[in-house]
Image (cartoon, helix red, strand yellow):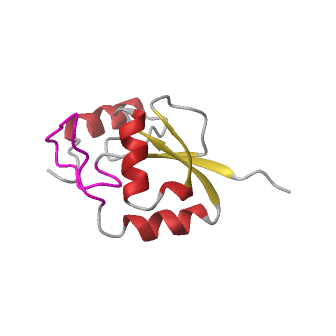
Amino acid sequence: MEKRKTILIDLDGVLNTYDGNYSENYIPEVKKGAKEFIKKLNKDYDLVLFTTRNNLKATKWLIENKIDKYFKDVTSVKTPAYLYLDDRAIEFNGDYQNTLKQIEDFKVYWK
């Protein structure tokens, strides 16, 4: 049996409706389409929730949104994975000049 690849998925701005207004005690509602997206991904990949939020609160959020069964773990550590899915990321393609330009021009999609 072939080992499934792991995808780390960020919570804020990817799975929820985060808009930059961080609150330690409130995690925004699940983003439209996120549940279906997670279910489809889970058919072929092991999913790990990646967040800097409190792990227990993030786990509770997964449970409340009925998607906890699709995740193997919740972590704040960038563990080895096939892919990292994040709303604040730039893919490094080997070209430092291009990467600098991307950093200078970067804007999160929700701004």
Membership of 17 in magenta stretch: yes
The one of 29 and 84 positioned closer to us in this rendering: 29
Location of residue 106 by image quarter: top left
Quadrant containing the N terminus is bottom right
Relative to 2, say whether 100 is above or below: above
- The residue under the point 30% across, 59% down is 30
Q: Is residue 58 left or right of residue 105?
A: right
Location of residue 69 by image quarter: bottom right
Q: Which residues are magenta?
A: 13-30
Residue placed farthest to the right in the image?
Answer: 1
Q: Is residue 6 left or right of residue 35?
A: right
- The residue under the point 29% across, 40% down is 102
Residue 85 in view of the camera? no
Give coordinates of residue 110: x percent, y percent: 18, 53
Residue 108 in view of the camera? yes
- The residue under the point 17% across, 49% down is 19
Give coordinates of residue 104: x percent, y percent: 21, 34
Q: Main secondary structure of the magenta part?
A: loop
- The residue under the point 41% across, 36% down is 56
Membership of 35 in magenta stretch: no
The one of 100 and 108 positioned closer to us in this rendering: 108
Give coordinates of residue 20: x percent, y percent: 16, 42
Relative to 48, say whether 34 is above or below: below
Looking at the rendered structure, the number of numbered marks drawn on it comes to 0
Relative to 71, say whether 54 is above or below: above
Relative to 76, say whether 87 is above or below: below
